[in-house]
Image: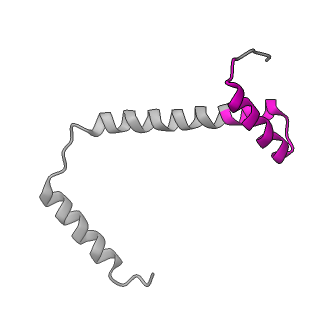
Amino acid sequence: MNTTVSIPQKLCKQADKIAIDMGISQSKLFTAAIKKYVEEYKDKNIANKFNKAYSKYVPNEQILKTGRANVRELLKNDTW
């Protein structure tokens, strides 16, 4: 799909240099950059939804202590 966007000249020149260094077209560089941005946005959005869903559950200190003790017990013979 072809589209037209306005990009600040300085950023466009920087992108041109990067595309040349990478040996790819400017179009491929922009596609890769947008794809990465979209993926990061989706990941952040999922994390935000998860955090919001669980934010109302405040962990009980005793539960945390027990959990830490259980993890220590499980790892006491681990040789890492």
Residue 12 located within the stretch drawn in magenta: yes
Quarter occupied by residue 62: bottom left
- Kindly report the secondary structure that dominates the magenta region of the rendered protein: helix
Q: State the residue at coordinates (68%, 32%).
A: 11
Which residue in the rendered view is the most extreme toward the front? 10
Figure label count: 0
Residue 73: percent from left, percent from top:
28, 77
Is residue 55 shown above or below 70? above
Q: Residue at x 79, y 41 (%)?
A: 17
| Residue in the picture at 63% in, 38% down | 36
Left or right side of 41 for 10: right
Residue 77 image offset from top left, x and y in percent: 36, 84
49 horizontally vs 24: left or right: left
Q: Which is more toward the observer, 57 or 11?
A: 11
Task: Please provide percent x and percent y for residue 69.
Answer: 22, 71
Q: Quadrant of the N terminus?
A: top right
- Residue 32 highlighted magenta (yes or no): yes
Residue at point 87% right, 44% down? 23
Placement of 62 over or under 69, stated as above or below: above
Which quadrant would the C terminus be assigned to in this image? bottom left
The range drawn in magenta is 6-33
Q: Is residue 33 left or right of residue 39?
A: right
Q: Identify which residue, 39 or 74, lies in the foreground.
A: 39
Position of 62 with respect to 4 (left or right) is left
Q: Position of residue 51 (x, y in %)?
A: 33, 39
Task: Give the quadrant of residue 57.
Answer: top left
Using the image as rendered, state which of residue 22 and residue 57 is in the foreground: 22
Quadrant location of residue 49? top left
